[in-house]
Amino acid sequence: MSRILSQGGLQRPIGRLGGITVSRHFSSDAKSKNFAVVLSGCGVYDGSEITEAVATLVHLSRHGCNVSSFAPYQKQMHTIDHTSGEEIKQDRNVMVESARITRGNIQTLDMLDADMFDGVIFPGGFGAAKNLSTFASMGMDCGIHPKVKTIIENFHKAKKPMGFCCISPILAAKALGKTTYGLELTVGEDVEVDENGNKWPHYAAAEAIENFGATHVVTDMDSAHVDKENLIVTSPAYMCEAAPHKVFDNVGIMIEETLKLLK
């Protein structure tokens, strides 16, 4: 004889132990929320950081959200051999590469309409600085993908929450920094090595955020920064040389805090 152990939420049998069916339980909201996720390719050095992108999808799913993924249908800036870090002569499409992460479920960025979603998430990876902006090559003189700028502006105008992690907060800074009062963002630390010995190789992005007109707030891997006035949540993720599970959990904090901002 078997029995299901349950205590509210959803029942999902995960195995049998000595004739007992053990279930894992997940809470679900009465009304699912619709979230857009904007990707920038597949692979940290020329696209979306895969751990961060997958963590975003998993945590949104765990909270019962309906997720639609988007990416620009365009040639990516360049292609990097991830075993060597060297550029290789190979053209790849940002949306086609992003589809590897989403099991093919993706739409062109032009289809993302802020009116159709409750919020939007931008995972990190160098693709945010190469394919969604030109920050990687032009630094402070960079531009931002016009559609990305419009999306961020439209969600902000509609007072819908946005989440950014790793290097992607530079997109919010570039889109809103000069026109939005009190914009607060984080990419983690503003020093190369913090007081606990954690390494932050891309700490200079904190200064860039300030130069774009926003305020950078120092945070660690156990937190995300919540700008309640502008409904924007940011977290460091792989801006820190951290273990994968810590990055996964940090993205989860960002997602959870973003969901708390829903009306």
Image (tube, helix red, strand yellow):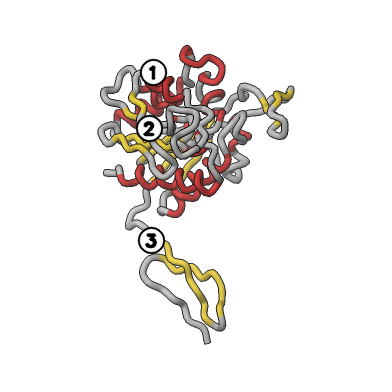
Q: Secondary structure at mark 1?
A: loop
Q: Residue 212 shows which numbered tag?
A: 1
Residue beneath disc 2: 218
Q: Residues within 10 Å of mark 1 (few under 14, many from 20)?
A: some
Q: Position of residue 154 (x, y in %)?
A: 35, 28
Q: Residue furthest bottom?
A: 1
In percent of width and height, residue 236 lies at 45, 36
How far apart, in angstroms, are the residues tagged by discs 1 and 3? 40 Å
Identity, as a three-letter code, of the amino acid under mark 2: Val
The quarter of the rendered structure image containing the C terminus is top left
Amino acid carrying label 1: it is Phe
Q: Is residue 70 visible?
A: no
Dot 3 or dot 2, earlier in sequence: 3
State the mark number for residue 27.
3
**Which amino acid lies under the numbered mark 3 shown in the image of this protein?**
Ser
109 above or below 260? above
Q: Is residue 257 visible?
A: yes
